[in-house]
Structure formats: C-alpha cells, structure tokens
Image (cartoon, helix red, strand yellow):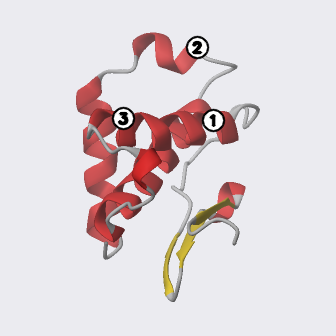
C-alpha cells in the first residue's frame, strides 16, 4: 500500500528520491546570486515531469528505471535553479535548451548518477 516512489524537494539543499531500498540524494545547484526563489519548487516539478514526458515514461505502469528517475530529479533541479535567477518566470523568457543541457552536464560532473 502507498506510493512506490517518493521525491522530496529540499529547496537550496537539493532533492531526494526514494524507491524501495534504493535512494538518490543530490545537492542543490549553487548560484552566485539568488534573485528570487519564489516558484522554484513548481519549476522543479515541471522539469521533473517534463523530463519523464519527454522520454515517454508511462507513470501508469508504475515502474520508472532508477537512472531515469535520477535524471528527472536533476532536470527538476536545473529548472528550479534557473527560476531563482530572475523575478517570476522572467529567466525562462530567454532560456535556451542548450543552457539547460549545459547545467545538467555540470550536475553530472559533480554527482554520480
């Protein structure tokens, strides 16, 4: 009974994903200047779900590969970090996919997932 996967957003401290006996913990992306963190959690959720949708992962089947879950958490964190750089959604008006992928690669360099 209950969910088989839980993702916990921890704001500036990153996020954690738990599934059965497996877990994934990652730090928050360090920004030199935080302009406004309002909405970062919603952006995390959008990045997380957006990655799963992009990959065609069917949540109705109830199984997400650990690697895909970890990548979704990282993309969520990437999007949350961009939200903090300007007021509201202003940063997303100019954000390019190449910037998102570059920040994802930065996460890959300092974490193991």
Q: Determine whether, in the image, residue 35 is placed left or right of residue 81.
A: right
Q: Nearer the viewer, residue 33 or 19?
A: 19
Q: Nearer the viewer, residue 61 or 23?
A: 61
Q: Which one is earlier in the sequence, the residue at label 3 or at label 1?
A: 3
Q: Nearer the viewer, mark 3 or mark 1?
A: 3
Q: Are marks 1 and 2 in contact (CB under 8 Å)?
A: no
Q: Is residue 20 above or below residue 35?
A: below
How busy is the neighbourhood of tag 2: few (under 14 within 10 Å), some, or many (20 plus)? few
Q: Quadrant of the C terminus?
A: bottom left
The disc at residue 84 is 1
The disc at residue 53 is 3
Count how many numbered circles sit on residues in the image.
3
Q: Are marks 3 and 2 in contact (CB under 8 Å)?
A: no
Residue 4 at x, y = what percent? 57, 69
Residue 68 at x, y = what percent? 31, 58
The part of the image, by quadrant, that contains residue 97 is top left
User: Real-space Cα distance between discs 3 and 2?
Assistant: 24 Å
Q: Is residue 104 above or below residue 21?
A: above
The disc at residue 35 is none
Q: Which one is earlier in the sequence, the residue at label 3 or at label 2?
A: 3
Residue at label 2?
90
Q: Is residue 91 above or below residue 60?
A: above
Residue at 40% from the left image edge and 52% from the top image edge: 61
Q: Nearer the viewer, residue 82 or 53?
A: 53
Q: Nearer the viewer, mark 3 or mark 2?
A: 3
Q: Which one is earlier in the sequence, the residue at label 1 or at label 2?
A: 1
Label 2 residue SS:
helix
The part of the image, by quadrant, that contains residue 96 is top left
Residue at 49% from the left image edge and 18% from the top image edge: 92
């Amino acid at each position: 009974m209950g969910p088989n996967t839980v993702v916990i957003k921890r704001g500036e401290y990153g996020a954690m994903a738990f599934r059965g006996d497996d877990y994934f913990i990652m730090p928050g992306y360090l920004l030199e200047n935080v302009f406004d963190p309002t909405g970062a959690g919603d952006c995390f959720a959008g990045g997380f779900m957006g990655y799963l949708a992009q990959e065609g992962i069917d949540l109705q089947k109830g199984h997400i590969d650990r690697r895909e879950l970890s990548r979704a958490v990282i993309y969520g964190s990437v999007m949350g970090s961009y939200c903090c750089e300007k007021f509201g959604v202003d940063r997303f008006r100019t954000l390019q996919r190449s910037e998102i992928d570059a920040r994802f690669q930065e996460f890959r360099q300092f974490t193991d997932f």
